[in-house]
Amino acid sequence: MHETIRHRCIRLGEMVIETKKTVRAIASTTGHSKSTVHKDLTERLHLVDPQLAREVKEILAYHKSVRHLRGGEATKRKWKTKKEDGKGRDL
């Protein structure tokens, strides 16, 4: 594995631990693609730093467990905004 990838994996892992942000949020913050961040955190990090990888895995598992709630909230906000603008149907 190239040294820059190793450093990126560690930096992304530490960022997840510190901020508890989602993969998408980390990707937009760092400028990397969501796919790159996800692959670094789930496949490459355990080769570089197994302990950090375990901690990151727990946080990612939490995000996965609550994603249906976040999606529901986003949809609720979307329809509320449309209704207020007069573009949505009555609920």
Image (cartoon, grey):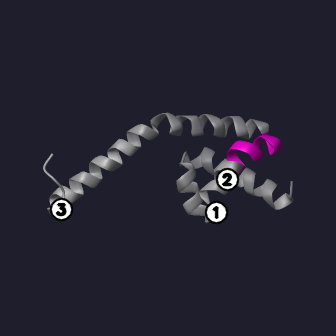
**Part of the protein shown in magenta:** 40-49
Q: At 65% across and 37% down in the image, what residue appears?
A: 57
> Quick check: marks 1 and 2 in contact, CB under 8 Å?
yes
Q: CA distance from mark 3 to mark 2?
A: 41 Å
Q: According to the image, label 2 marks what residue?
A: 12
Q: CA distance from mark 1 to mark 2?
A: 10 Å
SS of the residue at dot 3?
loop
Q: According to the image, label 3 marks what residue?
A: 87
Based on the picture, tell me whether residue 42 belongs to the magenta stretch.
yes
Magenta span: predominant SS is helix
Q: According to the image, label 1 marks what residue?
A: 32
Tell me if 56 is positioned left or right of 25 in this view. Answer: right
Considering the image in quadrants, where does the C terminus appear? top left
> x%, y% of residue 47?
82, 42
> x%, y% of residue 81?
23, 58
Tag 3: amino acid: Lys
Q: Is residue 86 above or below residue 53?
A: below
In terms of depth relative to the viewer, which is nearer, 44 or 58? 44
